[in-house]
Image (cartoon, grey):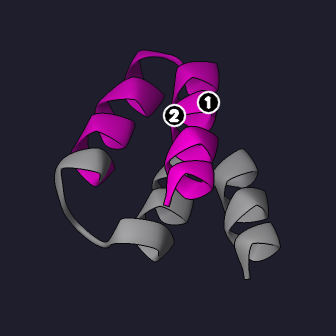
């Protein structure tokens, strides 16, 4: 299942974070990072998925 989340995180980072932790602090941080730059959003999403 982590592979699916990581693939989602690469194509749409907030979706990968949402599938891992739901709507919470990490989700909103990822939305902000994705808007500021696509790659920071990807890095954060993969980090959240790998951390949990």
Residue at point 63% right, 44% down? 46
> Residue at label 1?
43
Instruction: Say which element carries label 1.
Output: helix
Q: Residues within 10 Å of mark 2 (few under 14, many from 20)?
A: many
Instruction: Say which element carries label 2.
Output: helix
Q: Position of residue 22 (x, y in %)?
A: 31, 72
Q: Position of residue 10 (x, y in %)?
A: 73, 47
In the rendered view, tell whether residue 37 sits above or below residue 7: above
Quadrant of the drawing holding the N terminus: bottom right
Q: Are marks 2 and 1 in contact (CB under 8 Å)?
A: yes
Q: Residues within 10 Å of mark 1 (few under 14, many from 20)?
A: some
In the rendered view, tell whether residue 29 sits above or below residue 11: above
Side (left or right) of 19 relative to 22: right
Side (left or right) of 32 relative to 35: left
Tell me, yes or no, whether the highlighted magenta stretch contains residue 47.
yes
Magenta stretch, main secondary structure, is helix
Residue at point 18% right, 49% down? 25
Residue at point 27% right, 36% down? 29
Q: Position of residue 47 (x, y in %)?
A: 57, 40
CA gap between label 2 and label 1 equals 4 Å
> Residue at label 2?
44
Residue furthest out toward the front: 51
Q: Position of residue 30 (x, y in %)?
A: 38, 39
Per the rendering, the mark at residue 26 is none
Report the magenta residues as a range. 27-52
């Amino acid at each position: 299942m982590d592979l699916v989340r990581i693939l989602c995180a690469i194509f749409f980072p907030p979706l990968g974070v949402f599938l891992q932790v739901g709507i919470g602090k990490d989700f909103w941080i990822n939305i902000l990072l994705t808007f500021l730059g696509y790659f920071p959003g990807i890095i954060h999403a993969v980090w959240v998925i790998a951390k949990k």
